[in-house]
Image (tube, rainbow, N blue to C red):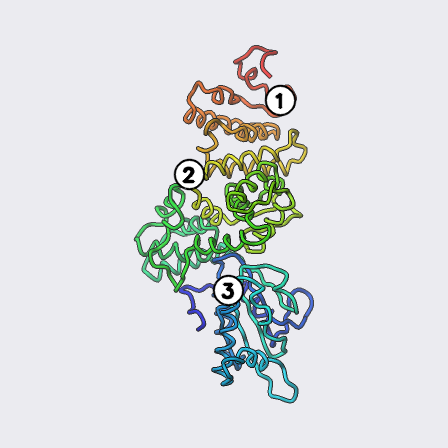
Amino acid sequence: MIPARAGCFQDRAEAARLVRALAGGGTAVVGPADELLAGGVLAGMGGVGKTQLAADYARTAWQAGEVDVLVWITASNATAAASGYTQAGIEILGADPEQAAKVFLACLEPKPQQRPLRWLVVLDDVADPADLHGLWPPVSPHGRTLVTTRRKDAALTGNGRRLIEIGLFTEAESLAYLTTALAARDRSEPDEELAALADDLGHLPLALSQAAAYLIDTGLGCAAYRDLLADRATKLTDATPNTLPDGQTHTTAAAWAMSIDRADSLRPAGLARPLLQIAAFLDPNGIPDTVLTSPPALTYLTDHATAAGYDRGQVGPQQARLALRVLYRLSLIDHTPSTAHQAVRVHQLIQRSVRDTLTPAQHDQTARSTADALMAAWPAIEYDTALAQSLRANTTALTACTEDALHRPDAHPVLHRAGRSLGEAGQVTAARDHFHHLTGTTTSHLGPDHPDTLTVPAQPRPLAGPGGGCGRGCDCVRRTAGRLPAGAGP
C-alpha cells in the first residue's frame, strides 16, 4: 500500500531533483554530468517528508504508465524487506514462498532478447543499511530503486546510488501549507502570525501539520499557540493533537526518540545521547567543535556513558568526534568540521524534545556542564572574532533556555564572560544592556547583597576604547562608574 497523499501536499524542489535522478529508467542528471544510476536514496531527519515525496513519485510514475511493476515495502528491518520481496514474488510470479524473494529479485535483472520489464521498487524507512545486505534490487536500465531513510552512511550510496538530502520547507512552502490547511476548515490567521509560527517550528513539515491540526482541534489562535510553545514548562507532546493527522503514527518527539536510541547503540556506544543533550542547550545555528570536545564536555560524556552501563574509561576528544559523526549519520545534527566555529547545527525542535526528556535535576546539571564547556573553550584573549561571536551566541542560547540553572548555586562565570567579550569587541551598548540584565537576574535569584550581584560591572567599556581601561578586559568599570577612586579596583 502506497501511503495516502497528505492533506495540503506541497510540491517541492526536492521532487524535481528526484525525478531528474531517476529519469529514463535510472539515467540521472545530477550536477554537470550524466551517469547511469541504480537508484535514489532520500535521506533526512525525521519529519521532513521523505515518505510523502517518495509516495508522490511512485504514484505519479504508476498513473503515467511509466512502470509495469511497482513494489512498495516498509523496510524498517531486514525481515520486513525480505517479506516484501516474498509477497511480490508470490503475487506477481506465483513463485514458491520459500524461494519467492530470490525469484522476484532475479526477474528484475535485465535480460537480452526479452521485452524490457519496467519496474520501481520503493524501500521506505530503512533504519540500518545492513538490513539491505543481499536485498538491493539489481542495476537495470529499465528499473528504478528508491529508498527513504534517516541514515547517511556510505554503504547507502554504493553501486551508483545517489543520495538526495531532503531538507525543511522554505518560508513560502510553510506559509502556503499553514494557510491552506487552516482554510480547509474555514480558519484564517494573519500571514505574519503564520510566518512567525513557522519560524518557531523551524519549518519542519511534520511539526507544521501537527500544529495546524492542534489549532483546528482546540480552536486556539495562532498567537496563543505560539505562547504555549514558548512556555518552558510546556513539552512538545503537550502541543500536539490527540489524533495525529494524515495517518501519522508518531509525534515529532517520538520520531526523534527512536533515532536517538539507535544512535546511542552505535559505536562509540553510549556517547551520542549525552553529546546531543549538551548540544540541545546551545545555538541551533552553529556550535564550535571545541565546545563539544572540551574537558568538561568529555567528563559529562564519561559520567553518562558509565551510568548507562558503558564502562569505557575517560572519554577522549576523538571518541566525542566519532559520536558527532554518528549523530550526523542518523540525521540528528548537521556536522561540517571545515566550519570549525559553527561545525554543528541542530534543529531547534530536536533540541526542545531532548531537553523535554530530562528531569529537573538532569536539566540543571546539563545546563551547568554546558556552561563549563563554553568557558573551557573560551580563549583568554580573543584574537579570533568569529569564534568569540559564536561563543557569545551559544551563551545567549544557553541562557534563553535555562537561565535559572545558571544562578544555582551561584551565577556561572560564563554569564560574566559573555558580557566582557561584548565589551572587548567594542559593543559597548550591548555590553551595558547585558550587565544590566545580569544585575537584575542575580538580584532576583541570589539577593542584592550576594557577591555575584555586587560584582556585576556597572558601566562596561570597550578594551582600549575611549576612556582607557586597564588592558585586561575587566573594563575598569567601578572606577568608570565613580564607585571607587582612581587607581583602585582591578
How far, Cα to Cα, is label 3 from label 1?
Answer: 61 Å
**How far across and down, in percent of the image, does residue 136 sit?**
59, 71
Labelled pair 2, 1 in contact (Cβ < 8 Å): no
- Name the element at disc 1: loop
- Tell me the mark number nearer the camera, choosing from 2 and 1: 2
Residue assigned mark 1: 466
User: Going from the N terminus, do you reach mark 2 or mark 1 first?
Assistant: 2
**Label 3 neighbour load within 10 Å: few <14, some 14-19, many 20+:** many
Labelled pair 2, 3 in contact (Cβ < 8 Å): no
- Name the element at disc 3: strand
- Tell me the mark number nearer the camera, choosing from 2 and 3: 2
Q: Residue at x 62, y 74 (%)?
A: 26
Image vertical order of residue 400 relative to residue 254, above or below? above
Q: Residue at x 56, y 31 (%)?
A: 418
How far, Cα to Cα, is label 2 from label 3?
Answer: 34 Å
Front-most of 415 and 173?
415
**How far across and down, in percent of the image, does residue 87 sit?**
48, 78
Image vertical order of residue 37 relative to residue 274, above or below? below
**How far across and down, in percent of the image, does residue 137 sit?**
59, 74
Residue assigned mark 3: 125
Front-most of 314 and 423?
314
**Label 1 neighbour load within 10 Å: few <14, some 14-19, many 20+:** few
Front-most of 490 and 199?
490
> What number is the disc on residue 360?
2
What amino acid is labelled 2 in the image?
Pro
What amino acid is labelled 3 in the image?
Asp
What amino acid is labelled 1 in the image?
Pro
